[in-house]
């Protein structure tokens, strides 16, 4: 299993990570090595085995549909790098 | 009385209640020891001395009121007792970095449920402990705030990712600490630092206010000097939480730990899995575990060989599933709602540049790996297959627990390794987790504790694993062992 440089760029794009050319090359090698190791899973016959959805027995988590107070917006905005008029400020998305 | 900071949690509670010690005296003793030893150990990311002293004074006022009118006001269980908290658990209005630059200024607006429960029991917070970035690591070397040193040998790692909590307790900078365990992050540092550490059953302890890494694996645990101390904190943080839908609504039993007794473990069936005694394991680690098992037998337990045949697949399963979950969980760190923002022209560039610059190398590696395992065309082969093999691993445990009560194994193949030893080989570092990952994948509880030292003077850790929600079996067995041995009382010379 050898990843190509282009595949690494595609994954980085999906993951929204800006990587330097040196990082891309490093991850190309390291991820190829790790995926090689993971390939041993392919040798197991898992036909008829359900995937684990939870390690716990199924249990109901329904609660009453009632409104409850949430955090006030000043608290929510406290950690924002940029905020304005009670909202998160971001670069323009639409022209 | 020996030095104040040498007291166990149980001794501290007694001394405070009997008025032999004030919480301020106690808290100051820890803060002074931290001031002396922290520069060499680096167990903490953030210290909270002002908060600690104000909580201590508040506790002393409550004790004074209680003494004037004993029995009248309710006395919280750990009133005035200091605690260290791993820096992935939120403490309101105190910086929570997760060991990452991407949260270097993050100030939570609420407490994690575990923290909240211990605050309501009167505990005093000394600070937030060092961790591998977002708990991704086995050595605490992946912290953006510098490595923590092992109190038993300053050139070695304390284990990870709860390495700061482990080093703090081992060096007696705190009597007890909270950690988290996604793939061994409580048990392995407890083992490397000679402590007792519980990874509870998945769903036993609330994850609310824990910054998520691998949500189907993460669990909050406790590191302390002995099984009794750890059990007493565990019972206070365990139990259903409406704020975490994965916690089970089951009663949390009081854990009764008896006095020393010759046949304390009569009838306890201990399984010894062949797959955990592989070639490559440090001979002294295997010898230490085998000697401990003999001692368990002398206390009345019956040891028998068992097989957990899919053990060898736990590592590849974990290193696909945990990164996959991490890649989704860490999508929220994008420079918009918290953390620093790297300025850029477009929104997309803000996301990419902030994440590229502020995440460390191991976090980026796992996000990349997880994104790949979930991406179109590879999902079935990697993520899907890993989830199926996880079922096989879980069934191994279910089958084993039809015949035995607990399973005994080493925590890690080796004792603490040197700082920098696995520097540029991520897979070699992942192999350190080979014996701890299966319990996370199966959701079963695991308790690590010290069973001796190797010829370098480094602690050897054993783990007991049990069926879901049967933590008390593990505590009872470890406590019986600690009643007739003194490994847990050894201290590093600092």
Image: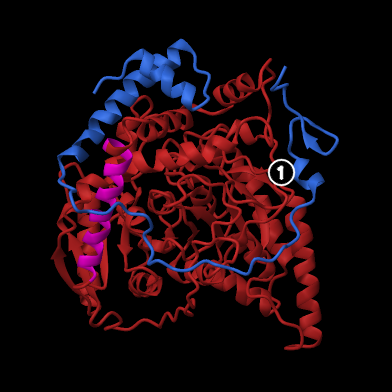
Chain colours: A blue, B red
What residue did someone put label 1 on? B107
- Is B75 located above or below residue B168 in the figure? below
Q: Is residue B401 left or right of residue A64?
A: left
Magenta span of residues = B381-401
The residue lying toward the viewer, choosing from B74 and B355, is B355
Q: Residue B346 in the image: state x and y as whole percent.
A: 66, 18
Disc tally is 1
Rendering quarter of residue B341: top right
The residue lying toward the viewer, choosing from B307 and B479, is B307
Whether residue B157 is visible to the viewer of this picture, yes or no, is no
Q: Residue B206 in the image: state x and y as whole percent.
A: 54, 61
The residue lying toward the viewer, choosing from B361 and B17, is B361
Q: Residue furthest right?
A: A85
Q: Residue furthest top?
A: A21
Whether residue B87 is visible to the viewer of this picture, yes or no, is yes
- The question of residue B394 being in magenta is answered with yes
Rendering quarter of residue B63: bottom right
- Is A69 located above or below residue A40 in the figure? below
Secondary structure at badge 1 equals: loop
- The question of residue B275 being in magenta is answered with no
The residue lying toward the viewer, choosing from B438 and B124, is B438
Q: Is residue B5 left or right of residue B70?
A: left
Q: Residue B203 in the image: state x and y as whole percent.
A: 46, 63
Q: Residues within 10 Å of mark 1 (few under 14, many from 20)?
A: many
Q: Residue B342 in the image: state x and y as whole percent.
A: 66, 21
Tell me what residue is drawn at x 36 percent, y 13 percent: A5
Q: Main structural element of the magenta stretch: helix, strand or loop?
A: helix
The N terminus of chain B is located in which quarter? bottom right
Label 1 resides on the chain identified as: B
Tell me what residue is drawn at x 68 percent, y 63 percent: B26
Q: Is residue B12 left or right of residue A19?
A: right
Tell me what residue is drawn at x 57 percent, y 26 percent: B355
């Amino acid at each position: 299993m050898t990843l190509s440089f282009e595949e690494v760029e595609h994954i980085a794009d999906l993951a929204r990570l800006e990587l330097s050319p040196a990082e891309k090359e490093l991850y190309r090698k390291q991820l190829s090595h790790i995926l090689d190791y993971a390939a041993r899973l392919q040798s197991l016959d898992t036909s008829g085995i359900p995937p684990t959805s939870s390690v716990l027995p199924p249990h109901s988590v329904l609660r009453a549909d009632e409104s409850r107070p949430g955090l006030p917006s000043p608290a929510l905005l406290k950690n924002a790098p940029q905020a304005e008029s009670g909202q998160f400020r971001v670069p323009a998305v639409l022209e | 009385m020996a030095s104040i900071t040498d007291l166990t949690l149980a001794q501290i509670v007694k001394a405070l209640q009997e008025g032999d010690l004030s919480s301020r005296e106690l808290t100051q003793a820890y803060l002074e020891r931290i001031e002396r030893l922290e520069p060499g150990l680096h167990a903490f990311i953030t210290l909270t001395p002002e908060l600690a002293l104000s909580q201590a004074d508040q506790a002393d006022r409550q004790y004074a009121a209680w003494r004037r009118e004993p029995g009248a006001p309710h006395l919280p269980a750990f009133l005035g007792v200091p605690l260290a908290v791993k820096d992935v658990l939120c403490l309101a209005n105190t910086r929570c970095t997760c060991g990452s630059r991407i949260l270097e200024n993050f100030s939570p607006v609420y407490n994690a449920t575990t923290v909240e429960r211990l605050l309501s029991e009167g505990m005093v917070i000394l600070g937030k402990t060092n961790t591998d970035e977002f708990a991704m690591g086995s050595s605490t070397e992946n912290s953006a705030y510098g490595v923590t040193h092992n109190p038993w040998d300053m050139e070695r790692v304390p284990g990870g990712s709860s390495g700061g909590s482990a080093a703090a307790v081992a060096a007696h900078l705190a009597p007890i600490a909270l950690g988290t365990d996604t793939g061994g992050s409580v048990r392995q540092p407890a083992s490397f630092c000679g402590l007792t550490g519980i990874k509870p059953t998945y769903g036993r302890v609330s994850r609310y206010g824990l910054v998520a890494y691998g949500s189907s694996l993460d669990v909050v645990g406790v590191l302390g000097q002995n099984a009794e101390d750890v059990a007493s904190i565990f019972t206070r943080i365990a139990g259903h939480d409406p704020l975490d839908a994965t916690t089970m609504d089951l009663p949390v039993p009081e854990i009764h730990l008896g006095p020393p007794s010759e046949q304390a473990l009569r009838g306890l069936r201990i399984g010894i899995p062949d797959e955990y005694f592989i070639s490559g394991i440090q001979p002294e680690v295997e010898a230490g575990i085998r000697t401990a098992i003999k001692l368990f037998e002398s206390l009345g337990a019956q040891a028998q060989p068992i097989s957990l045949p899919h053990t060898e697949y736990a590592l590849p399963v974990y290193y696909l599933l945990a990164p996959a979950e991490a890649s989704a969980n860490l999508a929220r760190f994008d420079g918009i709602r918290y953390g620093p923002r790297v300025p850029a022209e477009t929104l997309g560039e803000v996301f990419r540049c902030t994440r590229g610059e502020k995440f460390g190398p191991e976090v980026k590696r796992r996000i990349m790996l997880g994104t790949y395992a979930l991406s179109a065309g590879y999902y079935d082969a990697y993520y899907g297959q890993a989830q199926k093999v996880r079922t096989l691993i879980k069934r191994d445990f279910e089958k084993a627990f039809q015949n035995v009560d607990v399973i005994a194994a080493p925590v890690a193949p080796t004792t603490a390794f040197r700082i920098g030893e696995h520097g540029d080989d991520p897979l070699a570092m992942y192999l350190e987790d080979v014996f701890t990952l299966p319990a996370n994948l199966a959701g079963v509880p695991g308790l690590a504790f010290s069973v001796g030292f190797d010829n370098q003077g480094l602690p050897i850790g054993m783990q007991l694993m049990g069926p879901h929600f049967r933590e008390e079996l593990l505590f009872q067995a470890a406590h019986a062992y600690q009643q007739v041995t003194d490994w847990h009382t050894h201290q590093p010379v600092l």
